[in-house]
Image (tube, rainbow, N blue to C red):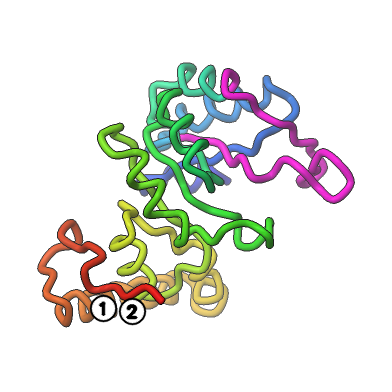
Amino acid sequence: MFSRIAATGAKTVRIVKPYDDNGKVRDQLQFAEEAGAFAVGMDIDHIFGEHGADVVIGEKMAVQTTDMLRSYVESTKLPFVVKGVLSIEDAVKCADIGASAIIVSHHHGRMPYAVPPMMILPEIKDALEGKNVKIIVDCGIASGADVYKAIALGADAAAVGRSMLSSLEESGTEGVEGFIRRVCDELRFIMSCTGFASVSDVDDTCLRFL
């Protein structure tokens, strides 16, 4: 499936699960690189299930140490992304091992007790200042207003994958195009109302914290 997606020419990031089989992790990273991925990475919030180590589609997951993650970063020529970061400590560790980007995410409530990504985002932004690590935020981003707040709070980008799935299921390619267009139009409208000409200019001066 990934090779078919990459063959479209889209800049695609391949996020690999933290498999218990270390060799499979490396094989997946190498396959993605050969298939033309723009970047690769690892999803670190699929480790524990209710009864111990998580199992995803029949595959057992395992805790990945900092040294293991560093070895994955060093094994590929592509930018490496770590998904599932929810603390300052983990964000700094990702920078230290050479990750090019992190995705601040609790996997859409997989950990219902976890801090909301938007809440921890400003602290992570401050901790990574000057470390050349891009910050992407995930979970519940479904509108231009959500993207605006994510950027204002310190994200370099916002992920809308899950939110656009219903549009994809209902109307295919046209549905996805329509979803993205609505998000972009709303973002443009809010930026015009708050005096920002470019996304890179957006900051938290127009946000109010209660």
59 in relation to 49, above or below: above
Q: In which quarter of the image is residue 170?
A: bottom right
Residue sticking out furthest to the front: 210
Which structural element holds mark 2?
A: helix
The percent coordinates of residue 150 (x first, y second) are 36, 63
Identify residue for label 2. Answer: 182
The percent coordinates of residue 57 (x first, y second) are 78, 46
Residue 5 lies in the magenta stretch: no
Q: Which of 153 and 141 is in front in this view?
A: 153
126 in relation to 188, above or below: above
Q: In which quarter of the image is residue 179?
A: bottom left
Amino acid carrying label 1: it is: Asp
**Mark seen at residue 55:** none
Which structural element holds mark 1?
A: helix
Which residue is at a point 52% across and 36% down the rendered structure image? 90
Residue sticking out furthest to the right: 51
